Image (spheres, helix red, strand yellow):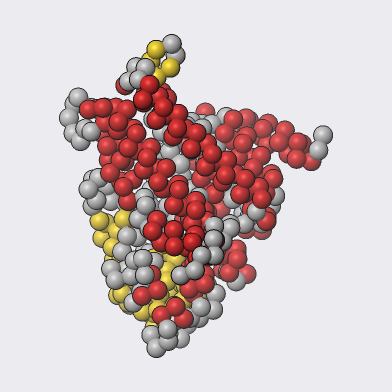
């Protein structure tokens, strides 16, 4: 038996013994936020067990709460989690964005202070990038950070701050030198959200949800020890973090084999009907099959990318391909969900609609923004053209 086969056998046995019934299949996933109470006791138990094993962040060094898994072992772990429909023990910007970024750019002190807490799910993070006048042209940001000895005083505003109302910390791009070209005067800092100088105002969307916020800074403090990378060189750090965000690789770790409400095939058979075990309507059957094939191909491409990467590290500009295609696939799925449900897929309120049906109407509206956030798909196409394909300006 090879070392990888032995790891698979051990991982399978451990998961079967330690993954609680309530952490299998659709359900709650811990975010690490100290402001959100975990409702399911099995969700908490699963987080604790996986954190102790180092499998909330499997490829991270064990010194920072990981398990030192190789890329090949990570792929095996993902596969074994899927086999038992084990949910992710932990999700959020800590494990997927700022954690990998600190591993590359953080000081030893920053890694020691922040990474173990992220791995254990003891706090959550949000992203301070976009501003009212700096969205797609992020380098035009104006939030200022004034050098004040052992800390920076931050003044300005961020917008579309996902999860700010429940976050414990923020990683933030700020302007530390206004007298140089815009890309050269930006720094990357970390700051706590529960301080007097930070004000958060949720933005209510057309879907009825408020996942985004306005964030205002009025002499907020970021300690000098939480400056990531060099002063005025934060653009490099910030761009690298976006590549982690756009890669979509973290979605692979979920181990979940179906969506929250079931597969598209299940929904189609329920609402459209079935004949001889197949979706009754040939046109709908073809749409579901096409989407399923595209989804599988996309996931396999992501998995191949993980397998081919060096030590599981995120790729560079090619991650824009994942972001562009993944969000369009997400929007197509939401649209197809509405079509399959017919009139039941357009409900907003009323007793004639189930909670799942009402939730999916809102999800369909929310997903319209998927091709805008994390860098619009138009921007991703520009990056692909210039940085991946090498096409001229």
Dividing the picture into quarters, in which one does residue 7 lie?
top right
- 72 to the left or right of 172: right
Image quadrant where one finds the N terminus: top right
In percent of width and height, residue 154 lies at 36, 77
Residue nearer the viewer, 10 or 121: 10
Q: Residue at the spot x=43%, y=17% of the render?
A: 278
Residue located at (62% from left, 49% from top): 306
At which x and y percent is residue 372?
Answer: 35, 55
Q: Quadrant of residue 101?
A: bottom right
Q: Position of residue 179 (x, y in %)?
A: 39, 88
Tell me: residue 94, above or below residue 79. below
Position of 102 with respect to 177 (left or right) is: right
Q: Residue furthest left?
A: 350
Of the pair 77 and 247, the residue shown nearer to us = 247
- Is there any visible trace of residue 125 in the rendered image? no
Q: Is residue 65 above or below residue 184?
A: above
Q: Residue at x 31, y 74 (%)?
A: 156
User: Compared to 111, does 78 lie above or below?
Assistant: above
Q: Residue furthest right?
A: 1
* Residue 293 in picture, x, y percent from top left: 50, 33
């Amino acid at each position: 038996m090879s070392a990888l086969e032995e790891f698979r056998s051990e991982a399978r046995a451990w998961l079967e013994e330690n993954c609680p019934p309530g952490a299998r299949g659709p359900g709650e996933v811990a975010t690490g936020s100290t402001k959100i109470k975990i409702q399911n006791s099995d969700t908490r138990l699963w987080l604790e067990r996986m954190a102790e094993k180092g499998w909330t962040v499997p490829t991270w060094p064990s010194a920072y709460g990981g398990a030192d898994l190789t890329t090949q072992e990570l792929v095996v772990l993902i596969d074994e989690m899927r086999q038992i429909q084990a949910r992710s023990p932990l999700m959020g910007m800590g494990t997927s964005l700022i954690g990998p970024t600190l591993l590359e750019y953080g000081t030893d002190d920053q890694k020691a202070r922040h990474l173990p807490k992220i791995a254990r799910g003891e706090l959550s993070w949000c992203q301070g990038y976009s501003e009212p006048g700096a969205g797609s042209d992020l380098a035009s940001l104006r939030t200022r950070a004034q050098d004040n000895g052992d800390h920076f005083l931050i003044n300005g505003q961020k917008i579309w701050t996902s999860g700010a109302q429940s976050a414990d910390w923020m990683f933030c791009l700020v302007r530390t030198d206004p007298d140089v070209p815009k890309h050269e005067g930006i720094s990357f800092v970390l700051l706590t959200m529960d301080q007097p100088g930070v004000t958060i105002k949720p933005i209510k969307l057309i879907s009825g949800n408020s996942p985004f916020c306005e964030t205002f800074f009025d002499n907020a403090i970021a300690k000098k020890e939480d400056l990531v990378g060099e002063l005025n060189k934060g653009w490099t750090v910030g761009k690298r973090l976006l590549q982690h965000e756009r890669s979509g690789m973290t979605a692979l770790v979920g181990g979940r084999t179906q969506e929250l409400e079931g597969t598209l095939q299940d929904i189609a058979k329920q609402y459209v009907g079935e004949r001889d075990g197949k979706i009754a309507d040939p046109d709908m059957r073809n749409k579901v099959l096409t989407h399923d094939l595209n989804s599988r191909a996309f996931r396999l491409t992501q998995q191949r990318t993980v397998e081919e990467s060096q030590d599981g590290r995120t790729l560079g500009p090619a991650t824009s391909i994942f972001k562009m295609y993944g969000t369009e696939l997400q929007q197509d799925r939401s649209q197809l969900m509405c079509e399959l449900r017919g009139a039941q897929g357009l409900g907003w309120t009323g007793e004639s609609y189930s909670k799942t049906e009402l939730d999916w109407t809102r999800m369909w509206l929310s997903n319209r923004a998927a091709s805008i956030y994390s860098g619009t798909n138009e921007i991703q196409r520009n990056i692909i053209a210039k940085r991946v394909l090498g096409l001229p300006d």
